[in-house]
Image (spheres, grey):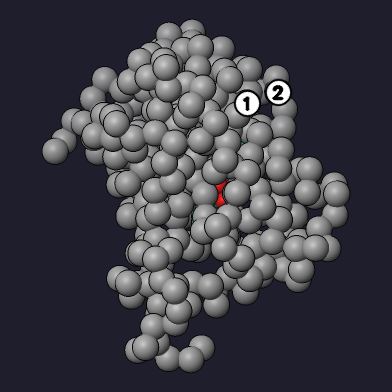
Amino acid sequence: MAGLMAGKRGLIMGLANDKSIAWGAAQALHEQGAEMCFTYQGEALGKRVKPLAAQVGSDFTMPCDVTDTDSLDAVFTAIEERWGKLDFVLHAIGFSDKNELRGRYVDTSAENFRMTMDISIYSFTAVMQRAEKIMPEGSSALTMTYYGAEKVMPHYNVMGVAKAGLEASVKYMAMDLGPKNIRVNALSAGPIKTLAASGIGDFRYILKWNELNSPLRRNVTTTDVGKSAMYLLSDLSSGVTGENHHVDAGYHVVGMKAEDAPDI
Ligand code: NAD
């Protein structure tokens, strides 16, 4: 099955380290022959991202903070100059103040609410506004979401509200860009221990609960998520858009605690 992404050039946003979901995706895309540009949020992360990019054959890395419009514009100018086109985009970015990823959602501050929505929802729209101009027919964009958008999960709070907005924005962008044969999808990943997840209150409990109660009786890995991300970014999913694809060991179909799951 090698070479599914041969000749395809894509942008990967949200790589922080080798635990990132974006890294699982980058490895799967590289295995299939994709060429990638990586953005990083600030020079401290750049020191980690550049060697990882090199491991998957890329010297194309750029700083980008999605709250800074100029840095976003600079990324697309550089891609247009170097490649002239963009076949795929992976948006794996989300952020909220960790002090509000515990306790009650109703106590969320206005300031953090706005920042969370801006970084976690609008940034994907802002990226697609720019990407659309250089994406050819048959190209594909993907963002990362979580089941906390659909059902209330402990401590996920304002991020759950943001993911619900992100999932809705995927559907609207799928409709807007569909006539150009640009596909837009979301991948709903099960819980994985990453830098971003470490900000969520009692995350270890969520991990354990999913492991004990999902149909596959395990948690997913960045490799599981990366392979499905590759499918959604490749021509294998040519008829799929506006979708929210769950890669969560089946947890989203479960209605109650498994009979064989011990109390935790
Ligand atoms: P991660 O910490 O490795 O990645 C999060 C990335 O977001 C980082 O690279 C960070 O630099 C970037 N980011 C945050 N604010 C930014 C800004 N202003 N500008 C540019 N980049 C910014 O963690 P991850 O778990 O791999 O997260 C990737 C995506 O997957 C996120 O959207 C997250 O919500 C989602 N997700 C994670 C899980 C999980 O359990 N880890 C589950 C489902 C969905």
**Circle nearer the viewer, 1 or 2:** 1
Residue 15 visible (yes or no): no
Label 1, secondary structure: give it.
Answer: helix
Per the rendering, the mark at residue 233 is none
Cα separation between marks 1 and 2: 9 Å
Q: Position of residue 14 (x, y in %)?
A: 54, 41
Q: Position of residue 221 (x, y in %)?
A: 37, 60
Q: What residue would you read off at disc 1? A: 126
Q: Position of residue 80 (x, y in %)?
A: 49, 10
The reply to whether discs 1 and 2 touch (Cβ–Cβ < 8 Å) is: yes
Label 2 crowd (10 A; few <14 / some 14-19 / many >=20): few
Residue found farthest to the right? 110
Nearer-the-camera pick, 171 or 245: 171
Residue 109 visible (yes or no): yes
Q: Earlier in the sequence, mark 1 or mark 2?
A: 2
| Rendered residue at 85%/54% (across/down) | 109
Question: Left of 233 or right of it: where is 193?
Answer: right
Q: What residue would you read off at disc 2? A: 69
- In this rendering, the answer to whether 261 lies above or below 68 is below
